[in-house]
């Protein structure tokens, strides 16, 4: 059963898509071209998933392309580990949905020239047809990359030569200068939002002097921090980002992609818009914090007098999710302080953590569809995400029987040694999933919570003298409770109505409760990890408190459970509903015959009741 190749929800409508639709109607661009440009300095999280779905979704809906680009302008914080993880996460999220829109390039290809009509002669979209001659279409786009070893993501660092040339052009036009101010002095000269800045004493250097100094910066003559290249805009601007911002700084650092070639590196604001232009991006979509950067984005492109069409930047509200922190710095704290086991811990909001927990790519895409795109910041209830996960898994998860906290049941009127093979439905939402056989024997396990010696009112499960139906099997009655010397229940002795299973004479007899079970003789042991929300408060960082002060001490419980025998052949790419319990997936720690299952989510929102209690 495929989990990833189903159609996502219909395309939403929002203000950015309305802009793109208008541009398509006006034939403003030959092709819509977006990009997803993460910095490879950490693992992607669910906030990035929203951006991926938006950028690739627009490309998909309007017949365009979305480039995957590494915005790798800061060598001190970036690493190949993050490049690899980003590729894996993006490929997983768009697989079977926007594969054809993924823009890659020929490995090692760089923009040597840009022709006068603005065409980019180095761009090669990685459409599926490029891989089809080498291997059949596969679920993971990363497999396509292996099949097409000549393709790779775009890198801002591939454009460093071109960006450097643009910087020299700004210097020649009198629009950039080399500044010797220290970082502290530069901050002072910059002013404040309510106070204008003042010009650097080095602002009026001649273009010739600036070119000489800039080239010497490039050649590594000066130490880190000694000089910067700054744009010459307006130190009195009300927009502090236009107060002669830094375009280049000196960094004697090894770069993961370019090695030791460069001693100076462009700032994000300088490289970003130029990378968009070089790649032919039409719609550069960012989160709202970059709205104040947009005038600088436009200034750089306009000041260079570049051939049209120029890319335009648009902003949307980033994702803020309840019971979650998305700051890379704070997520790093969780990892480094071993509060979680790593970046892919299933409690983490990272895409790799969410994937390991068993959430499907379609569920994440549907979540992005459900929350929409707005211009206003707000807090999205994690229940919206959980609803999308449950809705998706209900359709695709295979049903299985599992007992998490077992108590033994002996069916006294069922012959010893007798084994019955009963029919069980694999998925009531999918008739094509068919049925399977499950063994039934004299000794069973049921959940401890499904028996109460002194039951509360309206308890419709098993109790002394009471009856309950075993799912797919018989109605049983509890006749005797067996205890050890300490008074602990060790066994329930029951009788079964042997005519009450499906097709039997009394199969239509009604009892109020139905519980699940497994055959004791056939059950397999497995480690089951019951994951829950990582924080107990909806806003862990509210009012500046330490987010770690509201960590959920019950975010992980590890138990040994009893599972029906068919689960010994469980596959990590499949999802399972342990009936009446929740949704689970096989974990990567499943090695050497040891089964490990992660709980993706409970069947119902258990937190709603907790909130009501408070």
Image (cartoon, rainbow, N blue to C red):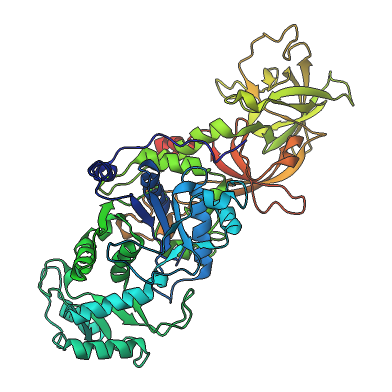
Q: Is residue 74 above or below residue 24?
A: below
Specify the quadrant that holds the N terminus.
Answer: top right
Q: Is any atom of residue 344 visible in this view?
A: yes
The foreground one among 80 and 159 is 159
Q: Quadrant of the C terminus?
A: top left
The number of discs equals: 0
Picture layout, residue 516 above or below residue 154: above
Residue farthest toward the front in the current orientation of the protein: 116
Residue for point 34% across, 74% down? 162
Q: Please provide percent x and percent y for residue 553.
A: 52, 52
Picture coordinates of residue 578 (x, y %)? 63, 34
Which residue is depicted at the point 19% across and 66% down? 302
Q: Nearer the viewer, residue 1 or 154?
A: 154
408 and 219: which is toward the camera: 219
Residue 488 visible in the snapshot: no
Tell me: residue 302, above or below residue 199: above
**Viewer-side residue, 186 vs 496:** 186
> Which residue is the extreme one toward the right?
417
Q: Position of residue 611 (x, y in %)?
A: 41, 39
Task: Residue lying at the far top in this picture: please name it.
Answer: 505
Which residue reaches farthest bottom?
A: 221
Task: Left or right? Give the position of 458 relative to 191.
Answer: right
Q: Position of residue 478 (x, y in %)?
A: 73, 21
Q: Residue at x 24, y 64 (%)?
A: 307
Depicted 316 relative to depicted 221: above or below: above
């Amino acid at each position: 059963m495929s989990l990833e190749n189903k159609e996502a929800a219909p395309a939403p409508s929002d203000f950015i898509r309305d802009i793109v639709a208008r541009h398509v109607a006006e034939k403003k661009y030959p092709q819509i071209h977006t990009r997803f440009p993460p910095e490879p300095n950490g693992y992607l999280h669910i906030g990035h998933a929203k951006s991926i779905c938006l950028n690739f979704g627009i490309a998909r809906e309007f017949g365009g392309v979305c480039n995957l680009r590494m915005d790798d302008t800061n060598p001190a914080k970036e690493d190949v580990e993050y490049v690899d993880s980003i590729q894996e996460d993006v490929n997983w999220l768009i697989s079977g949905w926007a594969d054809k829109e993924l823009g890659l390039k020929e490995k090692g290809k760089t923009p040597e020239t840009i022709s006068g009509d603005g065409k980019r002669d180095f761009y090669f979209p990685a459409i599926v047809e490029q891989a089809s001659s080498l291997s059949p279409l596969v679920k993971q786009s990363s497999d396509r990359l292996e099949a097409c070893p000549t393709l790779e993501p775009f890198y801002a660092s591939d454009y460093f030569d071109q960006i450097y040339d643009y910087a020299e052009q700004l210097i020649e036009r009198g629009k950039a200068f080399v500044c010797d101010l220290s970082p502290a002095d530069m901050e002072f000269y910059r002013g404040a939002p309510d106070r204008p800045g003042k010009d650097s004493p080095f602002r009026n250097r001649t273009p010739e002097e600036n070119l000489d100094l800039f080239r010497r910066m490039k050649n590594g003559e000066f130490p880190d921090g000694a000089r910067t290249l700054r744009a010459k805009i307006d130190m009195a601007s009300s927009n502090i980002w236009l107060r002669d911002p830094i375009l280049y700084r000196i960094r004697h650092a090894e770069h993961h992609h370019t090695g030791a070639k460069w001693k100076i590196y462009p700032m994000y604001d300088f490289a970003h818009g130029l990378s968009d232009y070089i790649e032919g991006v039409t719609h550069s979509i960012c989160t709202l914090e970059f709205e104040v950067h947009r005038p600088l984005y436009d200034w750089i492109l306009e000041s260079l007098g570049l051939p049209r069409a120029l890319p335009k930047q648009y902003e949307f509200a980033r994702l803020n999710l309840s019971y979650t922190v998305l700051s890379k710095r704070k997520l790093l704290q969780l990892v480094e302080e071993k509060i979680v086991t790593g970046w892919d811990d299933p409690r983490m909001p990272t895409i790799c953590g969410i994937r390991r927990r068993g959430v499907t790519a379609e569920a994440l895409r549907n979540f992005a569809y459900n929350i929409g795109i707005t211009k206003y910041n707000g807090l999205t209830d994690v229940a919206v995400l959980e609803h999308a996960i449950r809705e998706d898994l209900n359709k695709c998860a295979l049903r299985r029987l599992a007992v998490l906290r077992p108590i033994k049941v002996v069916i006294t009127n069922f012959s010893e040694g007798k084994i019955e093979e009963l029919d069980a439905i694999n998925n009531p939402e999918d008739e094509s999933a068919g049925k399977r056989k499950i063994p039934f024997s004299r000794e069973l396990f049921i959940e401890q919570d499904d028996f109460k010696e002194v039951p509360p009112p309206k308890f419709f499960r098993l109790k002394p003298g009471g009856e309950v139906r075993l799912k797919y099997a018989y109605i049983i009655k509890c006749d005797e409770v067996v205890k050890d010397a300490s008074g602990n229940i060790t066994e329930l002795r029951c009788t079964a109505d042997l005519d009450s299973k499906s097709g039997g004479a009394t199969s239509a007899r009604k009892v109020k409760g139905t519980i699940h079970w497994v055959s004791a003789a056939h059950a397999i042991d497995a480690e089951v990890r019951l994951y829950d929300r990582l924080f107990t408060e909806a806003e862990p960082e509210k009012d500046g408190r330490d987010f770690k002060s509201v960590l959920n001490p019950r975010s992980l419980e590890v138990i040994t459970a009893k599972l029906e025998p068919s689960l010994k052949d469980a596959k990590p790419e499949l999802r399972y509903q342990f009936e009446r319990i929740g949704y689970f997936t096989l974990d990567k720690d499943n090695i050497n015959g040891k089964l490990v299952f992660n709980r993706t989510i409970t069947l119902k929102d258990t937190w709603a009741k907790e909130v009501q209690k408070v």
